[in-house]
Image (tube, helix red, strand yellow):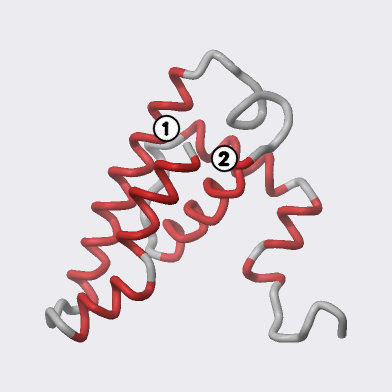
Amino acid sequence: VSLVIACDVHPLNNLVVQQYLERELGVDEAGRTQWMHHWITRGLSAVESLLTQNIAIGRFAGGERPGMAECFIVPQLYNARRFHLPLDDFPRLREIDAACAGLPEFEAAHPDNQSDKPADA
């Protein structure tokens, strides 16, 4: 799960790729959004399939405790929402995301809770 997101989904929708599409290829905002939707949907579909075929059923990807997979799933769903990608086809991913949202560690790491102040300030 982690590798699918880290190696197949994220590299195709990071800021550097978006800037290249815009600046070098002249892709307009609608085209970039279409690009993002296509690659995020493909990746999340693969992850959803992996998770629904996994016999380890629990609140999280690997059972009853969050692990590395959640550290990739949560930010990728955040990114999907930034681009207004419907997540209806990914119920298992949404369940995992919701379970993580209730944990203080994930809440603290959420982008909306970040500031530009140093951690020791």
**Residue located farthest toward the top when viewing the structure as drawn:** 55
Apparent side of residue 92 relative to residue 107 in the rendered image (left or right): left
Q: Which residue corresponds to the image point at 37% horizontal and 36% vertical from the top-left?
A: 89
Residue marked by disc 1: 48
Residue found 48% across the figure and 53% down from its top? 76
Q: Is residue 54 above or below residue 80?
A: above
Q: Position of residue 30 (x, y in %)?
A: 21, 72
Which amino acid, by three-letter code, is at mark 2? Ala
> In which quadrant is the C terminus drawn?
bottom right
Q: Residue at x 62, y 68 (%)?
A: 111
Residue 113 in percent (x, y) is at 71, 70
Alpha carbon distance from label 2 to label 1 = 12 Å
Residue tagged 2? 69
Q: Amino acid at mark 1?
A: Glu
Which residue sits at x=81%, y=53%?
104
**Sequence-wise, which precedes: disc 2 or disc 1?**
1
